[in-house]
Structures are given as structure tokens and as C-alpha cells.
């Protein structure tokens, strides 16, 4: 179904999105003008489960509309292939340090969230046990994962900064969708709390990656030499993130939301 916005309106007013319909479903395409863009680029972002059309600063909205309509089927297929979000609710299976755990609501139990190992005789998976009322399960699970992420990242950062003889100003956790970590010019480190769901060698690599920026604030050969000194087998972590990283974005109460 074509977008019904008149061509005159597209010429006269700048808009921030198009809605395109395919196979009975409406998909919203965000419009992003980029100064360095030379052509239209359509991208389905798995982390945020949305669609973005990048166009040059003076790109025609009329042509952009036609471009989006022509790729409506592609948009629908790519969105349909994305893994379904997994909220932090009872019965959900989520990874913790690379190992799948089943969230179990333990009504009336003491404590907040704790891990119970799988019974060796049953061969089942370990459990992430959550006490309290049902409406608070998701928040308690996420708070637990963030605490564990902070603990593991602080330990990894301390180990790598000691190795290089540098200091990090502070460590902040965020729910980022475009990068796993960052280092500011002031020496502040930021990480995605979702790294706690990845295997430990992945979290350790990301910690080393940002600590190395305390020595070189770039990705020069000198920088990579420092990073590789901290984590010689960095290719293993990079390969894991390339294949499985986007999967981590689907877990949580707001999984898949920008």
C-alpha cells in the first residue's frame, strides 16, 4: 500500500519518519539525515528492532518515500527474522555469564535474587530464583544482573589498569544499543550491563578494550598492540560478539525498545 502523504507536503515540510505497509503490517521507518551520506541507506537495527533510512542532507523526501516503498518486503522479512523479545518473567530462560538460567519465582522465600545450581542427577539448567511479589520479578532480575555486571567489570578493569599502570576515573553501566563500551577523554569508562549475560572471556575483553583507550584514545596500531597485550586471544571475543552479541539485546522488560 503506498504512503499517502502528498508530494507537495513532502517538499514543503521535513518529516521524521515514513509508515510503510506490507502484508497487512505497518512498519515505521525513521529518517536520519547525515552530513557525510551520499546515497540512501536502509537499515534494520536488531538491537532496537527498528528501521532507519539514512539520506544526504539535501536528499529528496519524494525519492526517499519511493525508495522505502520499493523495499517494503525486505523490511518486513528482516523484522520478522529478529528473535522475539524475552521479558524477565517466571519461566523465562536467560543467560548469566554465558550459561542459561531459568527464572523461578520463589514466593515467600527470603532474600531477593540468588542462583541455584542444577541438580546433577536431573541434568537440568541452573535457576535464577526471585522472591517477592510477581510484579517485581522483572525489576529484581535486572537489578541483580546489573549488580553482577558492575562487580565483574570492576574486577576486570582493576586487573587491566594495574597491568598498564593507569587509572580509570569511574565506571558507569548503561543499556546501550550501539556500542558495548566507551572511554571518555577524562578517563571515565562506560559499559553495557548486558555484558554479564555473555561468557566471562567476552566481558573481560571489553573491559580490556576500554582500559587500553586510557593509553591511546584511538584505534591505531599502537592501541591494538596494548589491547592485545592485555587479551592475546581477543579474536575469540570479537567473533563471539559478532555472532551472538545482538541476541543479548532481546532480554529484559524493555527488550527491543530504543
Image: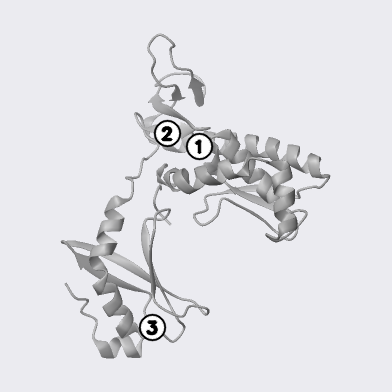
Instruction: Select label 3 or label 2 by which is in front.
Output: 2
Which residue matches tag 3? 14
Q: Position of residue 96 (x, y in %)?
A: 50, 32
Question: In the rendering, at what x and y percent does residue 200 appear?
Answer: 58, 34
Q: Is residue 136 visible?
A: no
Q: Which of 83 and 71 lies nearest the eye of the viewer? A: 71
> Is residue 72 visible from the viewing direction of this image?
yes
Task: Say whether residue 65 is left or right of residue 179.
Answer: left
First in sequence: mark 3 vs mark 2: 3
Disc 2 marks which residue? 94
* Pointer 3 local density, CA inside 10 Å: few below 14, some 14–19, many at least 20: few
The residue at 26%/88% (across/down) is: 7
Q: Front-most of 193 and 106?
A: 193
Q: Secondary structure at mark 1?
A: helix
Tell me the distance, in whole angstroms, between the alpha carbons under discs 3 and 2. Answer: 42 Å
Q: Which image quarter is the N terminus in?
A: bottom left
| Residue 186 horizontal/vertical position (percent) | 75, 58
What SS does tag 2 mark? Answer: strand
- Contact (Cβ within 8 Å) of mark 2 with mark 1: yes
Q: Name the quadrant containing residue 160.
A: top right
**Closer-to-camera residue (148/84):** 84
Badge 3 marks a residue whose secondary structure is: loop
Q: CA distance from mark 2 to mark 1?
A: 8 Å
How far apart in space, not on screen, are marks 3 and 1 (Cα)?
41 Å
Category of crowding for the residue at label 2, using alpha-carbon neighbours closer than 10 angstroms: few (below 14), some (14–19), many (at least 20): many
User: With respect to residue 234, does 61 lie above or below?
Assistant: below
For image coordinates 65% across by 39% down, the residue present is 153
Is there a contact, CB below 8 Å, between mark 3 and mark 1?
Answer: no
Task: Provide residue 189's location: percent of width, then percent of height.
Answer: 68, 51
Residue 197, numbered circle: 1
Q: Is residue 108 above or below residue 75?
A: above
Q: Residue at position x 72%, y 60% from top?
A: 217
Amino acid at each position: 500500500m503506498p504512503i499517502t502523504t502528498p508530494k507537495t507536503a513532502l517538499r514543503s515540510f521535513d518529516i521524521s519518519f515514513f509508515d510503510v505497509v506490507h502484508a497487512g503490517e505497518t512498519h515505521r521507518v525513521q529518517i536520519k539525515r547525515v552530513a557525510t551520506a551520499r546515497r540512501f541507506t536502509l537499515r534494520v537495527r536488531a538491537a532496537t528492532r527498528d528501521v532507519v533510512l539514512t539520506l544526504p542532507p539535501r536528499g529528496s523526501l519524494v525519492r526517499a518515500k519511493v525508495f522505502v516503498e520499493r523495499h517494503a518486503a525486505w523490511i518486513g522479512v528482516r523484522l520478522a527474522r529478529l528473535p522475539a523479545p524475552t521479558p524477565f518473567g517466571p519461566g523465562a530462560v536467560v543467560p548469566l555469564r554465558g550459561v542459561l538460567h531459568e527464572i523461578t519465582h520463589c514466593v515467600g522465600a527470603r532474600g531477593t535474587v540468588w542462583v541455584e545450581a542444577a541438580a546433577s542427577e536431573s541434568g537440568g539448567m541452573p535457576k535464577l530464583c526471585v522472591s517477592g511479589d510477581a510484579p517485581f520479578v522483572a525489576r529484581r532480575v535486572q537489578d541483580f544482573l546489573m549488580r553482577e555486571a558492575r562487580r565483574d567489570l570492576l574486577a576486570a578493569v582493576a586487573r587491566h589498569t594495574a597491568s598498564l599502570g593507569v587509572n580509570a576515573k569511574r565506571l558507569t553501566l548503561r543499556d546501550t544499543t550501539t556500542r558495548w563500551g566507551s572511554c571518555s577523554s577524562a578517563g571515565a569508562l562506560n559499559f553495557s550491563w548486558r555484558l554479564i549475560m555473555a561468557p566471562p572471556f567476552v566481558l573481560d575483553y571489553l573491559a580490556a578494550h576500554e582500559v587500553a583507550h586510557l593509553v591511546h584514545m584511538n584505534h591505531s596500531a599502537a592501541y591494538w598492540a596494548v589491547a592485545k597485550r592485555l587479551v592475546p586471544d581477543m579474536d575469540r571475543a570479537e567473533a563471539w560478539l559478532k555472532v551472538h552479541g545482538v541476541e543479548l539485546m532481546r532480554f529484559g522488560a524493555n527488550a527491543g525498545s530504543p
